[in-house]
Structures are given as C-alpha cells and as structure tokens.
Image (tube, rainbow, N blue to C red):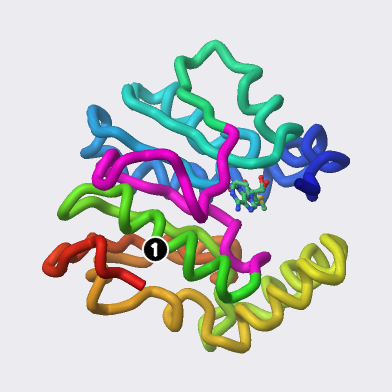
Amino acid sequence: MRDDYSSSAKTYDPVLHLALKPIRISVMNELLEFKEKAIIDLCCGTGNQLKLLAKNGFKDLHCLDRSTAMLEIARDTDHPLNIYNEDATQTSFENESFDIAIISFSIHEKDRNTQENFIKEAHRIIKKDGIIVVVDFVFDSQTTILAKFMITIIERIAGKEHYNNFKSYIQNAGLSSLIKEDRFEHIDDKRKLFNGVTVSIFKKIARFDITTIN
Ligand SMILES: C[S@@+](CC[C@H](N)C(=O)[O-])C[C@H]1O[C@@H](n2cnc3c(N)ncnc32)[C@H](O)[C@@H]1O
C-alpha cells in the first residue's frame, strides 16, 4: 500500500508544531476527566496527541495508523503507547473495545466513502456511551479569511488528490453532513486556529444493534 507520508513524516511535527500545539491542548482539556479510560487515536500519525496525553497522566493509550513512516516517529517515545499498523476503516479490535476514539485531521483528506468508514469503525469499537473526538477543518461564517487562506495553501501543497478531497469535504458542509444523528449525540465544539479548525465531541448512541450499521 502507498505511504502518502513517507517523505513528510520526519518534518510533520516540527513544521506544524506552532499551529497544532493549541489544538492538542484543547483535545486534552476535553478529555481530562477520562485519564483512566481506554483511548484510541485512529490515524494517529506521529502519535503527537497521545504523547501529550501520556505526559499528562493518561494511562491506557492506543495509537493506530497505516503509514510506516509516521509510526516510526510515533514509536520514538519513552511513553507506554500501544501502537498498531492497521487500516482505520477496518481494524482488528472487537466491538466496544475503547471508551474514547480520536480522529484528528484525517477525515478531510479522504473520499466520502473512506470518511464514512472511519466514523462507522470508530462507532463500532467504542463502548456504549463512548466518546469520539473529531478534529478537522471547518469553513463557515465564523472562519476568518486568514484561516481559510492558510488552510487552503497547506491543502494545495499536500497534493492534488488530497486537495480535491478537502474541497469536497468543505463543499459537503464538512463534519456536520458526515456524523449521523441517530448514531451520535453532539456534545460540544471548540473552535481553534482562527476558527478554521473544530474540536468536536460526540457521544455514541447505541440504541440499535451495531451489527446492523451499514
Ligand atoms: C494529516 S495526518 C494526521 C495525523 C494525526 N492524526 C494528527 O492529528 O496530526 C493523516 C494520517 O492519517 C493516516 N491514514 C490515512 N488513511 C488511513 C487509514 N485508512 N488507516 C489508518 N491511517 C490512515 C495517514 O497515514 C496519516 O498519518
């Protein structure tokens, strides 16, 4: 399988550090009451988010990606992270294995089918009343022109397929059209990066049999 991040893995954290740090802190603040819970970061990249959580006393941390290059950076830590090289659309975990799933900056770059499969898989592997934290771009009336400009430049640099998926994501009203109200209850949104990024919290609704989700 092609590794889209083989050439950018080593520079990912240093280049994006300033922009991502407040977002990582915001995600951690949303999760402070869950320090003892099982948390999985789907499409974790360099594991930067979980390293911050580990440093701040979170205990049961799992990290999944399918880029060998990104996972090599994720493994470069003294923190006890459980790291898996797997596809986030179809993981090996049993139903309801985790309390919390994080999906950060991974949805916008995918085609619609993959986006839906990320969300479905997150729903399957979190427990009843589990939480998903989705971090991704949002372009709406609150988003500043500066944020739109910066994010568009970054997405253009990321390549044609990535940029086309990003444009469709934005045109499709982003996350709000993706998260199904019968599966998740919307809990909270925090806006970051000049209102161009949302940290969105949803709680799983498990009122139907998970095997029937399609
Ligand atoms: C933009 S990076 C985001 C990384 C990290 N979540 C963050 O917030 O910085 C997108 C990540 O998604 C991973 N990814 C893309 N498709 C995937 C899939 N189907 N399964 C697992 N990881 C995937 C890529 O390898 C990459 O590490």
Q: Which residues are magenta?
A: 85-110
Quadrant housing residue 76: top right
Residue 87, magenta (yes or no):
yes
Identify which residue, 113 or 98, lies in the foreground. 113
Other residues around mark 1 within 10 Å, as few (<14) / some (14–19) / many (≥20): many
Quadrant housing residue 32: top left
Quadrant housing residue 145: bottom right
The residue shown at (18%, 65%) is: 205
210 is higher (above) or lower (below) than 37: below
118 is higher (above) or lower (below) than 169: above
Residue lying furthest top? 78
Q: Position of residue 58 (x, y in %)?
A: 34, 26
Q: Position of residue 61 (x, y in %)?
A: 39, 29
Disc 1 residue type?
Answer: Lys
Residue 86, magenta (yes or no):
yes
The residue shown at (56%, 87%) is: 172
* Residue annotated with mark 1: 120
Identify which residue, 142 or 165, lies in the foreground. 165
The residue shown at (64%, 72%) is: 111
